[in-house]
């Protein structure tokens, strides 16, 4: 007998990372924009940055400070510790350090 409690979700974060690579700030930002059906110009206005800067973030050419990541999350109504932890984990990966970060807030 299978109960809801025994069922495991097909995709958790670890499975998604295994299939698609690690979650990056660029992917997080772009996926939020696409999920909200916003253009880059609309999202840039909401974040109070230029469309060009947003494009650089979405393509990984720029990298936000921790404060900027938290500010973006708050402006978008998202959980700021999650966005900041994504940035910290990306910083760690750039240094070849395989750590997971959990922030409370």
Image (cartoon, grey):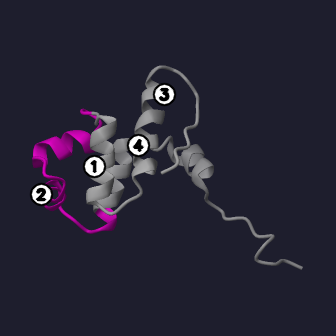
Q: Of tags 3 and 2, which is closer to the observer? A: 2
Res. 42 image quadrant: bottom left
Q: Which mark is residue 71?
A: 1
Contact (CB < 8 A) between labels 4 and 2?
A: no
Res. 52 image quadrant: top left
x and y percentages locating residue 55 in the rendered image: 19, 45
Query: Front-most of 24 and 65?
Result: 65
**Residue under numbered circle 2:** 45
Q: Of tags 4 and 3, which is closer to the observer? A: 4
x and y percentages locating residue 24 in the rendered image: 41, 41
Cα separation, mark 1 vs mark 4, equals 10 Å
Cα separation, mark 1 vs mark 3, equals 23 Å
| Label located before the other in sequence (1 or 4) | 1
Residue 85 lies in the magenta-colored region: no
Contact (CB < 8 A) between labels 1 and 3?
A: no
| Label located before the other in sequence (1 or 3) | 1
The residue sitting at the right extreme is 1
Question: The N terminus appears in which quarter of the rendering?
Answer: bottom right
Seen at 25% across and 32% down, the residue is 61
Q: Is residue 28 left or right of residue 19?
A: left
| Label located before the other in sequence (2 or 1) | 2
């Amino acid at each position: 007998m299978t109960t809801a409690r025994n069922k495991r979700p097909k995709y958790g974060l670890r499975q998604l990372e295994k299939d698609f690579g690690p979650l990056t700030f660029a992917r997080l930002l772009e996926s939020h924009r696409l999920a909200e059906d916003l253009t880059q110009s609309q999202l840039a206005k909401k974040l109070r940055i230029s469309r060009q800067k947003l494009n650089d973030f979405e393509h990984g050419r720029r990298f936000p400070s921790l404060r900027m990541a938290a500010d973006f999350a708050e402006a978008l109504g998202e959980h700021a510790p999650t966005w900041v932890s994504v940035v910290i984990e990306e910083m760690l990966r750039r240094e070849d350090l395989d750590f997971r970060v959990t922030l409370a807030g």
